[in-house]
Amino acid sequence: MNYHKYEDDTLMTITRIEKRYEIEEEFLQELSSGDFSRALSVYKVFSGLKLEERSGDSYQDAKYLAIVLGTLCRKTLQYRNKVHPYYLNAISTEMALELNNTKTVLDIKNISIKYIKKYCLLARNHSLHQYTDIVNKTISYIELNYKEDLSLSDLSKHFHISKNYLSAIFRKQLGKTVTEFIHNVRMDKAIFLLNSTKLPIHNIATLCGYNDSNYFCRIFKKQHEISPAQYRNSLFQ
């Protein structure tokens, strides 16, 4: 047995593994920051590395790598960014279903890039790592239950804390009141529905948690300086 060759091969393998883990960590840092452009650049370097073949089948190896990539993205955003599992599960399920329908290695790479972008958007829009636990829980609860009747009083009862404490800590960390945040979440949903559906305004109001469509219109105009109807009309001008 050529021990020098064995040692050289072992050293090369160790170096390759170390390089892979180093690039993997760099990718996850960019993902966590929500920087899609930089995350994509690092991903391309990572995907270009000569990795150990798992099955002898390039398609299956690419699929395995994509599954591992998806898992790393999901767990990174869960633990580093404190993104709510509801959002992570939705994207993870979508990615798994799309991977099951692939036929080529190129299909798999395109899907991987598509979901890297989606995970970066999650990191930018739903990261809660900068807030305390109770504020994290309050934000997530509002985002997942915005269609329901929500108020500072309801939330304080749900989390078994005083209204004054929740109000103070929420304003301190977000720079806005709980009520303002509820309206912001609902208005984001309203904009999405106005852009993507032809539903009547009163239906959109209900779907966004407003039983009174006139009140909904007042809040919308206060935030956007035009009414929901005017906003919708502007889309076709």
Image: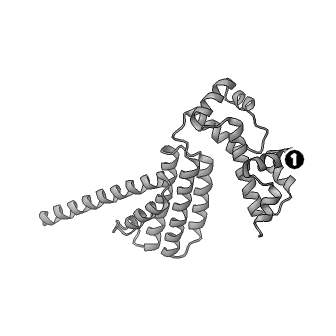
Q: Which one is in front, 213 or 106? A: 213
Quarter containing the N terminus: bottom left
Q: Is residue 234 visible?
A: yes
Q: Position of residue 156 (x, y in %)?
A: 69, 28
Q: What color scheme is it? A: one colour
- The residue under label 1 is 214
Quarter containing the C terminus: bottom right
Q: Position of residue 6 (x, y in %)?
A: 17, 63
Q: How many marks?
A: 1
Residue farthest to the front? 225
Q: Position of residue 212 (x, y in %)?
A: 87, 44
Badge 1 marks a residue whose secondary structure is helix
Task: Judge from the rendering whether residue 2 lies leftward or rightward of residue 25; answer left or right.
Answer: left
Residue in view at x 43 percent, y 73 percent: 58
Task: Judge from the rendering whether residue 109 lies leftward or rightward of residue 235; answer left or right.
Answer: left
Residue in view at x 51 percent, y 76 percent: 104
Q: Residues within 10 Å of mark 1 (few under 14, many from 20)?
A: few
Location of residue 136 with respect to 161 vertically, above or below: below
Q: Is residue 134 visible?
A: no
Task: Judge from the rendering whether residue 167 lies leftward or rightward of residue 220; answer left or right.
Answer: left
Amino acid on which disc 1 is placed: Asn
Location of residue 198 with respect to 28 vertically, above or below: below
The image quadrant that residue 160 belongs to is top right
Q: Position of residue 166 (x, y in %)?
A: 64, 28
Q: Which one is in front, 214 or 121? A: 214
Residue in view at x 74 percent, y 62 percent: 195
